């Protein structure tokens, strides 16, 4: 018998119940689940320990035979609340979940769709739908925690596969992982990257939480915050450092990209 | 008989279907998209051109690369920027990775399982372990190409107007080249597997449209071939009409009031003689008669493109290994301008249009995705196919319709954006 099949049988023999899970998507690009699927075989091995009963990207049973009373130990949600159906779905799954995880920048901070919050939302809808703009649902984009209790947030746009895998390993045992207060800078330093800030480029690294592997600065692209701000980012200090290379308006535009501006501007006003 | 499918799983994004059949006549067949409107074009207006690629990439998680690159191409058109040969090669390599990854996912995990009676694609590892692992390996190869050139596979980091922020190391390119050769026998097995599956027949009346270029299998450039007549990307774009129905979040795209057939099948119909050698041989061995208007044969066309693209990786990486990559970027001068560009996304021709003011701010933009172009045609095909299912049970009809929609490889998030 193959090793992993044996493991499953042994677990069942011990009476260990697999953690039940649902992976669901609201309005989004599905990028975070695709990033998770990048783990490839590793992810499918994860399915040995996790009974993912609903994951409509790759299975159809749950939509052909939906189980209204199904409860889950773990529900992982990606995407934004845009339609009423998104909202109802989120609230419904929250009721059915022991733990609910917001997956990715859209779910955790608003993400790219939140860009419309900073401009004229109605104008944006009018641009796309013309006279029919009023019939299209166009709410302010808010993180999932503004709608339901969220037990854990995994940031990133997309999420980092390993970040996800490490978090799930903990969560499947019912343990909420500790949130690191390390910055992206520390990840850059570990990789011995040259510092983009020191090169005179505006990199949000010092304000942003580690866990993404500093992918962007490692490829010569300054961090623009998709992995979310620290609990207590030193914004004033950072803005002093960059004031000669970028205007406040332009810096504000960078903060807007993944919907994290409110956290950074608010901190600054303190 | 009213048919309502609430949610068609195993597709990118969210959509359902309603259809009505009365005495063998189809009164209605309509895809109901459920994806919320993220208003990307509205969001892009007012942003700086340097953000167009990064923002539009987030339209889709399975084809972010093509949005990024098409945005760059259009912006460069608007600014009058001519990129270097090496930038074009690197972008082509990125596109090859995109297509390999996307096709491998769609064929073996989203569509083929339907013909094998598998509702949960994870069961592919149980029922067809060797082939499922091989398909995963093919997908991983595509992702790896995107990560080497783009920095990561979902939402690339390195592409920019004028070139790239960072270049792949020779060792990484060499490794991709070696892998493309080693993986080819495995790809051939995968392609032949698709050839053994009996697929439904349907003669679609939709007109194929795809990029075409003499001398090579067009992906990143070329003119648009429609009804076998070539025209510039700009003309083809202007000939498209976006239909906005009240309350609908997706716009249906038509040309001359008709839906279009875009994607692998359209491309193969036009460019089959430019397939790389092994892919060309596989086409012969599969005895796949072209031109084909059978949308169920999309996976056959995609499988052949998979082989073609893997062979093409060797060609492109070989060229890149002879270039000093560090010198490939060009200077960008900001000015007012407008342009439309097109690249063949895995699912078909993608158009991005931008208008910039003299400071580089986007003052207008429009994005027409392949799936938006497919919708009207798909609904017409469903109307044609439905009567042939008359003698089946309701559950069987539902399953047949789900299978059919999946066959097209629709991307609802893209279509809605």
Image (spheres, rainbow, N blue to C red):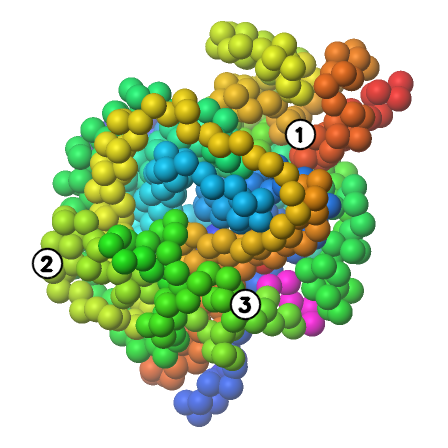
Q: In the rendered view, does B188 fall on the left or right side of A259?
A: left
Q: At x 79% / y 41%, what residue is drawn?
A: A118
- Residue at which label 1 appears: A151
Q: Is residue B109 above or below residue B130?
A: below
Is the N terminus of chain A in the top left, top right, bottom left or bottom right quadrant?
top left
Location of mark 3 (residue)? B238
Q: Residue at x 67, y 29 (%)?
A: A151
Mark 2 or mark 3: which comes first in sequence?
Answer: 3
Same chain assignment for discs 1 and 3: no
Q: Position of residue B13 (x, y in %)?
A: 52, 53
Q: From mark 2 to mark 1, how far is it between C-alphas?
A: 54 Å
Q: Position of residue A187 (x, y in %)?
A: 55, 12
Name the element at disc 3: helix
State the CA–CA distance, disc 1 to disc 3: 49 Å
Mark 1 falls within which chain? A
Q: Viewed as shown, does residue A214 lie left or right of A208? A: left
The range drawn in magenta is B246-250
Q: Where is the C terminus of chain A found, in terms of image quarters?
A: top right
Residue closest to the eye, A240 or B28: A240
User: In the image, is residue B99 above or below residue B392?
Assistant: above
Q: Position of residue B250 (x, y in %)?
A: 60, 63
Q: Nearer the viewer, residue A122 or B195?
A: A122
């Amino acid at each position: 018998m193959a090793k992993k099949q044996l493991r499953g049988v042994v677990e069942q023999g011990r009476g260990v119940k697999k953690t039940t899970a649902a992976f669901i998507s609201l309005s989004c690009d599905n990028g975070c689940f695709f990033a998770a699927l990048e783990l490839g075989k590793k992810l499918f091995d994860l399915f040995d320990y996790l009974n993912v009963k609903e994951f409509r990207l790759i299975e159809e049973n749950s939509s052909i035979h939906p189980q209204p009373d199904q409860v889950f130990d773990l529900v992982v949600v990606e995407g934004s609340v845009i339609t009423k159906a998104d909202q109802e779905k989120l609230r419904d799954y929250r009721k059915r979940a022991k733990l609910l995880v917001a997956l990715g920048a859209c779910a955790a901070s608003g993400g790219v769709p939140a860009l419309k919050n900073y401009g004229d939302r109605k104008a944006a809808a009018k641009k796309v739908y013309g006279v029919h703009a009023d019939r299209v649902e166009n709410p302010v984009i808010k993180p999932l925690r503004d709608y339901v209790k969220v037990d854990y947030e995994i940031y990133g746009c997309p999420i980092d596969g390993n970040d996800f895998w490490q978090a799930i390993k903990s969560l499947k045992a019912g343990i909420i992982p500790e949130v690191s207060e390390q910055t992206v800078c520390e990840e850059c330093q570990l990789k011995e990257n040259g510092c983009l800030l020191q090169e005179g480029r505006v990199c949000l690294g010092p304000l942003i939480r580690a866990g993404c592997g500093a992918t962007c600065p490692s490829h010569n692209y300054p961090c623009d915050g998709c992995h979310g701000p620290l609990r207590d980012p030193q914004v004033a200090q950072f803005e002093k450092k960059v004031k000669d290379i970028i205007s406040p308006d332009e810096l504000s535009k960078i903060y807007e990209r993944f919907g994290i501006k409110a956290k950074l501007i608010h901190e600054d006003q303190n | 008989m009213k048919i309502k499918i609430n949610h068609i799983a195993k597709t990118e994004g969210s959509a359902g279907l309603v259809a009505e059949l009365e005495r063998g006549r189809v009164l209605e067949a309509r895809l109901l998209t459920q994806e919320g409107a993220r208003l990307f074009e509205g969001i892009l207006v007012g942003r700086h051109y340097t953000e167009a690629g990064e923002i539009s990439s987030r339209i889709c998680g399975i084809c972010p690369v093509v949005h990024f690159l098409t945005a760059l191409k259009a912006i460069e058109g608007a600014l009058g920027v001519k990129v270097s040969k090496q930038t074009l090669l690197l972008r082509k390599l990125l596109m090859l990775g995109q297509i390999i990854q996307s096709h491998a996912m769609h064929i073996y995990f989203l569509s083929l399982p339907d013909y094998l009676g598998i509702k949960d694609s994870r069961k592919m590892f149980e029922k067809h372990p060797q082939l499922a692992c091989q398909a995963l390996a093919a997908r991983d190869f595509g992702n790896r190409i995107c990560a080497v050139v783009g920095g990561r596979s979902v939402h690339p980091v390195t592409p920019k107007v004028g070139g790239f922020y960072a270049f792949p190391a020779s060792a990484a390119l060499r490794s991709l080249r070696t892998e493309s050769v080693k993986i080819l026998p495995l790809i051939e097995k995968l392609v032949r597997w698709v050839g053994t599956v009996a697929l439904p027949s349907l003669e679609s009346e939709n007109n194929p449209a795809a990029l075409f270029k003499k001398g090579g299998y067009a992906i990143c450039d070329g003119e648009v071939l429609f009804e076998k007549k070539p025209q510039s990307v700009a003309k083809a774009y202007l000939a498209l009409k976006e239909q906005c129905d009240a309350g609908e979040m997706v716009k249906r795209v038509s040309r001359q009031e008709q839906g279009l057939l875009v994607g692998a099948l359209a491309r193969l119909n036009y460019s089959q003689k430019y397939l790389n050698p092994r892919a060309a041989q596989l086409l012969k061995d599969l005895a796949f008669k072209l031109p084909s208007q059978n949308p169920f044969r999309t996976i056959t066309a995609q499988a052949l493109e998979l082989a073609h693209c893997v062979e093409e990786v060797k060609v492109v990486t070989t060229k890149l290994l002879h270039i000093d990559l560090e010198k490939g970027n060009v200077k960008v001068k900001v000015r007012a301008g407008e342009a439309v560009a097109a690249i063949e996304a895995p699912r078909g021709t993608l158009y991005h249009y931008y208008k910039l003011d003299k400071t580089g701010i986007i003052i207008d933009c429009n994005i027409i995705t392949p799936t938006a172009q497919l919708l009207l045609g798909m609904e017409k095909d469903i109307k044609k196919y439905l009567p042939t299912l008359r003698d089946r049970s309701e559950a069987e009809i539902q399953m047949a319709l789900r299978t059919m929609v999946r066959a097209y490889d629709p991307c609802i998030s893209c279509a809605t954006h």
